[in-house]
Amino acid sequence: MAERTLRGARLGGQSFEDERGIEFAARQQVGYRCPQGHDFEITMSVEAEVPAVWECPRCGAEAESTAGIEREIKAEKPVRTHWDMLLERRSEKELEDILKERLELLRGGEIGPAHLHRATQKKRRASA
């Protein structure tokens, strides 16, 4: 077992990389406060666009920026129903005509579920 061990650096040990000569990106601390009163700060790049809302790490609520950054209010589209989409393609008069035509076919037994028309078909055959 001893022959299988890794030689050299320990697992999870120190890094041999050096921080000399590395220029870190400029950073800023952005403060947030949630509705429960939790205050916290997030480190961000100076170049980053700072969001107005951030999730609170303690309770998960939406925390707002303490720097006075306002939320963008997005204009919401009105909800389109099936009826609205149908009226984009056909007029109400056309829809009434189609409904009358389909009801006649349904009542005549030409369309629709077969189990609804079996009894009427047997009656027609018997009378013919």
Image: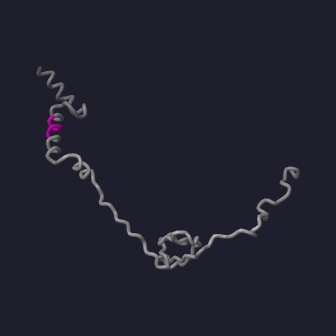
Which residue is found at the position 17% from the left and 41% from the top?
99
Left or right: where 112 falls relative to 60: left
Residue 14 falls in image quadrant: bottom right
Left or right: where 72 falls relative to 122: right
Question: Which residues make up the magenta segment?
Answer: 100-104
Residue 11: image location, x then y, percent:
78, 59
* The C terminus sits in image quarter: top left
Residue 41 falls in image quadrant: bottom right
Q: Answer whether residue 31 is magenta in the image.
A: no
Which residue is found at the position 49% from the left and 76% from the top?
65
Which residue is found at the position 49% from the left and 70% from the top?
51
Left or right: where 47 falls relative to 97: right
Magenta-colored segment: predominant secondary structure: helix
Residue 32: image location, x then y, percent:
52, 76
Residue 105: image location, x then y, percent:
17, 34
**Residue extending furthest right?**
3
Q: What is the count of numbered marks? A: 0
Q: Is residue 11 above or below residue 52?
A: above
Which residue is found at the position 74% from the left and 69% from the top?
21
Residue 120: image location, x then y, percent:
17, 29
The front one of 59 and 80 is 80
Q: Is residue 28 above or below residue 79?
A: below
Left or right: where 84 falls relative to 1: left
Q: Is residue 77 above or below residue 38?
A: above
Q: Which coloring applies here? A: one colour
Q: Is residue 51 above or below residue 103?
A: below
**Residue extending furthest top?**
128
The front one of 17 and 32 is 17
